[in-house]
């Protein structure tokens, strides 16, 4: 599999010499959708800035399409990617004017046809002659995305693209982005604070904690400490494999969480917690369920599994997972 990006022993420091990113070995596959997840301050936006060639790495090696990226060549690489910031900036004028100007600057032909096509795809045709300053938050996000996508970049980078969208608009954007990657074969990288959304939408996930990659989707994430072969959070005692001796965070991937209406045998799963269903929703063709056991567990199951369990809001259910499903860091 080819990579759009490859980091080798790469580090990025802020101006005050504070280490913001430390990526020993990280690859982002070409032609795939990659999600970046993590808590606030984990390095998501910093990584996107590096991927957009807005910031050079401080140490180590960064390859873009197998080419070594040098500090004095950032501009030429920057022109090959599209970056949508969390709070995009639009120029004065209409949505049409903004998209048309981007096309003119890049000397693109058939501009009117390209504009008509992209606003239709993003379902903002009604905004085409609307002044940018009059757009709602969701319309602004889509208009800025249209202005970027119309240039057909090799890589699309999105920083929290769903932040200002209502549920209906967010679902439309999700399906559009999935079809975009399939249609163009280009690379798409996005960050999100909604870890289950990232898990459902992306082909691959990059989970960051304190600027470093951690090999867990960070969905069922609990803070606490290791004592013996157990991890203690504020409200849970989680059994661990015997080789884990330290760590302040424990995470369990949603696919490793097994739901049951009755308590399973002791030898089946070492970790078993009884809770109450507090949310059921659709998540990209599957079902997302939140269970309150004193801490909130999140699971993704099929519609058939939901039917078999016959769960509704407020029902009691058991959350089960093996000790070796727990990642501690």
Image: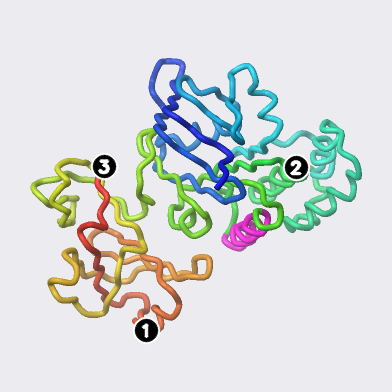
Q: Identify the residue under disc 3.
A: 329
Q: Residue shown at 30%/72% (left/top)?
A: 259
Instruction: Find the distance from the CA under tag 3 to the CA under tag 1.
Output: 35 Å
Q: Identify the residue under disc 2.
A: 147
Instruction: Find the distance from the CA under tag 1 to the CA under tag 2.
Output: 46 Å
Instruction: Find the distance from the CA under tag 2 to the CA under tag 3.
Output: 40 Å
Quadrant for the C terminus in the image? top left
Mark 2: give few (<14), some (14-19) or many (20+) Cα within 10 Å.
many
Q: Is residue 40 above or below residue 198?
A: above
Element carrying mark 1? helix
Labels 3 and 1: the sequence-earlier one:
1
In the rendered image, which quarter is residue 17 located in? top left
Q: Position of residue 304 (x, y in %)?
A: 43, 81
Label 3–label 1 contact, CB within 8 A? no
In the rendered image, which quarter is residue 159 located in? top right
Q: Is residue 51 above or below residue 281?
A: above
Q: Position of residue 314 (x, y in %)?
A: 32, 75
Q: Which residues are magenta?
A: 167-180
Mark 1: give few (<14), some (14-19) or many (20+) Cα within 10 Å.
few
Q: Nearer the viewer, mark 1 or mark 2?
A: 1
Q: Is residue 256 above or below residue 160?
A: below
Element carrying mark 2? helix
Labels 1 and 2: the sequence-earlier one:
2
In the rendered image, which quarter is residue 317 located in? bottom left
Q: Position of residue 273 (x, y in %)?
A: 20, 67
Labels 2 and 3: the sequence-earlier one:
2
Q: Identify the residue under disc 1.
A: 308
Answer left or right for 79 relative to 46.
right
């Amino acid at each position: 599999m080819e990579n759009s990006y490859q980091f080798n022993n790469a580090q990025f420091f802020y101006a005050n010499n504070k280490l913001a990113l430390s990526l020993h070995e990280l690859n982002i596959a070409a032609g795939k959708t990659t999600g970046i997840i993590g808590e606030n301050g984990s390095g998501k936006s910093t990584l996107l800035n590096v991927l957009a060639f807005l910031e050079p790495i401080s140490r180590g090696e960064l390859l873009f399409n197998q080419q070594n990226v040098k500090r004095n060549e950032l501009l030429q690489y920057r022109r090959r990617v599209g970056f949508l910031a969390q709070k995009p900036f639009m120029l004065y004028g209409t949505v049409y004017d903004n998209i048309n100007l981007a096309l003119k600057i890049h000397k693109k032909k058939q501009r009117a046809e390209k504009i008509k096509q992209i606003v239709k795809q993003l379902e903002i045709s009604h905004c085409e002659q609307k002044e940018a300053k009059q757009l709602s938050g969701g319309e602004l996000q889509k208009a800025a995305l249209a202005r970027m996508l119309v240039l057909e970049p090799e890589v699309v980078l999105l920083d929290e693209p769903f932040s200002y969208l209502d549920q209906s608009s967010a679902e439309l954007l999700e399906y559009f982005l999935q079809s975009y990657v399939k249609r163009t074969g280009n690379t798409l990288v996005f960050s999100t604070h909604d870890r289950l959304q990232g898990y459902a939408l992306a082909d691959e996930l990059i989970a960051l904690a304190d600027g470093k990659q951690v090999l867990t989707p960070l969905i069922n994430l609990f803070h606490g400490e290791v004592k013996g072969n157990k991890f203690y959070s504020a409200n849970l005692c989680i059994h661990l494999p015997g080789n884990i001796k330290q760590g302040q965070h424990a995470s369990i991937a949603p696919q490793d969480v097994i739901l049951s209406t009755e308590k399973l045998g002791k030898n089946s799963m070492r970790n078993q917690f009884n809770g109450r269903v507090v949310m059921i929703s659709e998540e990209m063709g599957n079902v997302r369920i939140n269970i309150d056991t004193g801490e909130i567990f999140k699971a993704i199951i099929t519609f058939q599994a939901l039917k078999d369990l016959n769960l509704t809001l407020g029902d009691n259910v058991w959350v089960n997972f093996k000790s070796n499903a727990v990642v501690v860091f």
